[in-house]
Image (cartoon, rainbow, N blue to C red):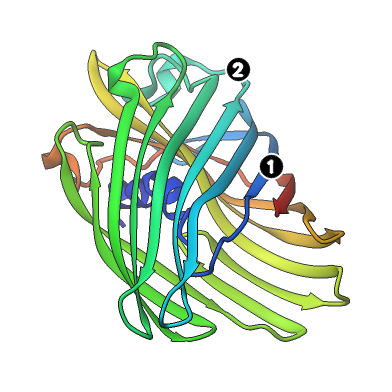
Amino acid sequence: MNKTIIYLSQLFLFLLLTISARSQSGISGEFKVDYVPFSKYVRPLDSTKTNSESNFKRAQIAFEVPISFKIDEYNNPKLWTIFFQGAYARMENKNYEIQSLPLEFQGGFPNELLNSQIGVKHLRSISPSWSLLIMASVGVYTDMVEINKDDVLIQGGVLFIKKFNPNLSFGMGPVLTNSFGVPMVLPGIYFNWESKGALHFKVAFPEGLELGYRMSDNFDLKAVAEISGMTAETRIRNKSSLMGYQQIIAGLRPQLKLGEHWTLEPTAGTTLVRNFSTTNRKIKDIFREKDIADPKFTTTFYGAIALKWKF
């Protein structure tokens, strides 16, 4: 599969995570920290596991505030909200030799990454089963080496969402981004399928999937698999490029409701995929295949804890 396509799906993850076909009549948010201990670097040239090691520690916060909300003639929400999302990660890199790294990482893997964005979202019905979602955001995506105008990315989208039943929704539409230097339009996809019983599941693109059993009104035990990552503008051979960090994890996630407004979600599991990728900020490089695989790391433990609120 084209590595740039994987990267692009990660780039838009921050934006797409703000999508919801449900009403948000109150303030909602989440604070989350996750941790990946040291694991071995796998040299992409020959897939050899080396003695070099990197870890990953990240703190994330997100909240959404409605500025206008009402129920329309189809008994669906019509709302405007503003949202903010931010993530800061630190990485320690040990025992690396420059010659073992790809040319794109001759300066070494990054020690810090910062992603933040602020935006606005509008959701409204256009028929009993169709909704229109409009989004726009501006954010800073940087490796903290130097923060300048190249680190500022603008994203926006218009999605048409079909609600087939209360548990299944699918949407598509154009997404606008300046990630590749000039404004360009790419396809955006939203998919959400979930059940509501004691034994329940959820499949959401691009976040992941979960299978759970609700033991009580306040306790839910889930098996999850999900993708996450970060994006940063960086300089490679004195040219502006985009770097992506991706990880896919699987694990167990108990969900404990703390009263009416708060939810605690610890996660323990393993990393299935963990790698870096880079791409030039040129339109011609979007679908170009790479000659060498992206640098990756061996499987290891994954841990996280999240506190969510909704008022």
Say if mark 1 contacts mark 2, CB within 8 Å: no
SS category of the residue bearing label 2: loop
**Residue type pointed to by label 1:** Lys
- Against 225, residue 303 (above or below) is above
Residue 102, numbered label: none
Asked if residue 30 shows in the view, the reply is yes
The part of the image, by quadrant, that contains residue 50 is top right
- Number of other residues with Cα within 10 Å of mark 2, as a class: few under 14, some 14 to 19, many 20 or more: few
> Which residue does the image show at 58% across and 60% down from the upper left?
25
Give the percent coordinates (x, y) of residue 52: 59, 25
- Against 130, residue 88 (above or below) is above
Which of 129 and 283 lies nearest the eye of the viewer? 129
Left or right of residue 44: residue 239 = left
**Residue ID for mark 1:** 32
**Residue type pointed to by label 2:** Asn
> Which residue does the image show at 61% across and 62% down from the upper left?
225
Residue at mark 1 to residue at mark 2: CA–CA distance: 30 Å
Give the percent coordinates (x, y) of residue 248: 55, 53
Which of 46 and 140 lies nearest the eye of the viewer? 140
Quadrant, the N terminus: bottom left
**Residue ID for mark 2:** 95
> Which residue does the image show at 48% across and 31% down from the upper left?
115
> Which residue does the image show at 39% across and 14% down from the upper left?
147
Between circles 1 and 2, the one closer to the viewer is 1
SS category of the residue bearing label 1: strand
- Number of other residues with Cα within 10 Å of mark 1, as a class: few under 14, some 14 to 19, many 20 or more: some
